[in-house]
Amino acid sequence: MFNPYYISVKNQEYFYMSGIWQEWTDKHTGEIVQTVSVTTAEAKPLMQQVHNSKKRIPTILNDDLAYEWMFGDLNDERITEIALSQFPAKQMDACTIAKEFLVTLEPATPFTYEDLPAIQYAI
């Protein structure tokens, strides 16, 4: 069973994550399929607590890197560099939320699980 977490960037209504998009053709049906994937990097201390089994985190981008990711003429080296970048944990918040978060009026309300330690990280 999983415990859901609410992760946000402090003082921001939304944030950017890097992803890749590709279209491919199903060899059996000829159907053209649109695919998307979010890039991930190794989780650092804060996100290791959230993503504790695979130790990875989606790549969160600041405004400048997001603009470069979407509109820059990037070579493979720069793509890898941005995709593996780490957003500073001190600029993020994270907390556990209720498993029924989809049907609540305030889905980001912190919720405590008795069997799960509180998220601890140094700012």
Image (spheres, rainbow, N blue to C red):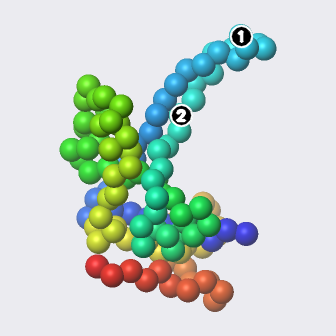
- Helix, strand or loop at label 2? It is strand
The type of residue carrying mark 1 is: Gly
Q: Which residue is drawn at 65% across and 15% down?
A: 25
Q: Which residue is drawn at the image coordinates 65% and 86% (left, top)?
A: 115
Establish if 54 lies above or below 20.
below
In this rendered view, identify the residue nearer to me: 117 or 106.
117
The disc, 2 or 1, on the residue closer to the chain's N-terminal end is 1
Q: Left or right? Give the position of 9 relative to 116.
A: left
User: Residue 9 sits in which quadrant?
Assistant: bottom left
The kind of secondary structure element at disc 1 is loop
Which is nearer the eye, 49 or 63?
A: 49
Local packing at callout 1 (Cα closer than 10 Å; few below 14, some 14-19, many 20+) is few
At x 57%, y 24%, the residue is 34
Q: Provide residue 62's location: percent of width, then percent of height.
A: 26, 51
From the viewer's perspective, tell me whether residue 7 is left or right of residue 88. right
Quarter of the figure that contains the N terminus: bottom right
Residue 120 percent across, percent down from the top left: 43, 83
Query: Does residue 105 appear in this view?
Result: no
The residue that mark 1 highlights is 30
Identity of the residue drawn at 26% across and 25% down = 73
Residue 119, x across and y down, in percent: 47, 80
The circle drawn on residue 36 is 2
Viewer-proximal residue among 98 and 2: 2
User: What is the quadrant of residue 4 in the picture?
Assistant: bottom right
Please identify the residue farthest to the top as the structure is shown.
30
Hey, which residue is sitting farthest front in the picture?
77
Residue 10 position within the rendered picture, expressed as x and y whole percent measured from the top left: 29, 66
Q: Are marks 2 and 1 in contact (CB under 8 Å)?
A: no
- C-alpha gap between disc 2 and disc 1: 19 Å
Determine whether 121 is above or below 5 in the image. Answer: below
